[in-house]
Amino acid sequence: MPEQAAGAGQGAGPQHEVEVVETVEQVIRRRISDVLGGWYGSLETALPTVAFVVLWLLRDEVRPALFAAGGVAIILLGIRLSIGGSVRFVLTSIFATAIAAFFALRSGNAEDAFLPGILTSAAYGVGTLVSILARWPAVGFIVAAGDPGYAEHPTQWRQDKALVRVCSRLTWVLVGLFVVRVAIMLPLYLAGEVAWLGVTKIALGWPAYLTAVVIMGFMLATGRTPVTQDEGTQSGQGAAQRSGE
């Protein structure tokens, strides 16, 4: 039976017990939800690409398409500044748009706007695979980033072996996502299929991330890995308690 939190009354009801008991899966699920930024953050990263594809299909010109993408990104930044909240997703979108514009304007080929994304996916795929093999799974850092004590102890999460095992399994989902992106988009890039590149980039952007999150969510929902701790440390218990504060 799960243990109740220290100080909890013996007469506490089932609902209270569910609230104070933590598993590795519960901790990870809460942290990933906080870091991903929700639907609006994902929209901020996707809309500039939509603008680029639509303008390119209408005009068949690189510069207007890039200007449209940049304009949308700047508008989104203005909206975010006016309503408040984190600007990291829209700034990421602006940075990605600037890199895409550099590649496309330098060559004059619209398909080169998608090359940075393909290269980035390839790099992420290799990086996430190496992180698993090195037992520093990438998802672990996503989870740790939601810990209030992350800045002071950025590697403390690795002291919980159960957390590392679960994060390794979840990171395989990201490896698969990046492999699929490169496998589909690289042939389209080599063939110069700009329209299909735009469609697949949108499809393999937020929808693919959502699919990955759903798969991770299913894995977390069916898992019941208890939080563990090494001798002399309380990383797992501390992470669980902090996540509930």
Image (tube, rainbow, N blue to C red):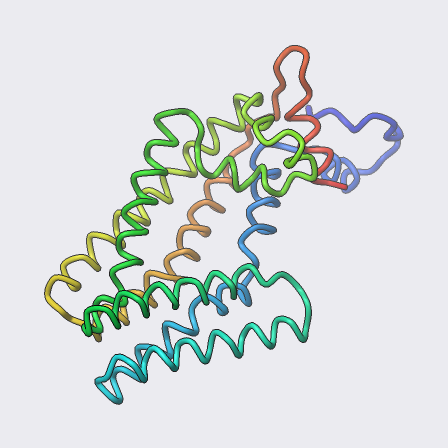
Please state the horizontal and vertical placement of residue 93, each as a whole percent of the image: 45, 65
Foreground pick, 188 / 217: 188
Image position of 240 (left or right of 182): right
Give the quadrant of residue 148: top right
Image position of 37 (left or right of 137): right
Q: Quadrant of the N terminus?
A: top right
- The structure residue drawn at horizontal position 85% and vertical position 35%, both measured from the top left corner, is 12
- Residue extending furthest toward the front: 106
Image position of 187 (left or right of 176): left
Q: In which quarter of the image is the C terminus?
A: top right
Please state the horizontal and vertical placement of residue 137, each as a whole percent of the image: 44, 32
Please state the horizontal and vertical placement of residue 215, each as a whole percent of the image: 42, 47
Foreground pick, 105 / 68: 105
- The structure residue drawn at horizontal position 49% and vertical position 64%, both measured from the top left corner, is 42
> How many numbered tags mark residues here?
0
Foreground pick, 68 / 228: 68
Q: In this view, does 14 lie above or below 48?
A: above
Q: In this view, does 230 lie above or below 130?
A: above
- The structure residue drawn at horizontal position 57% and vertical position 50%, both measured from the top left corner, is 35
Foreground pick, 162 / 60: 60
- Residue extending furthest toward the left: 191
Q: In this view, does 34 lie above or below 48?
A: above
Please state the horizontal and vertical placement of residue 232, each as a whole percent of the image: 68, 12
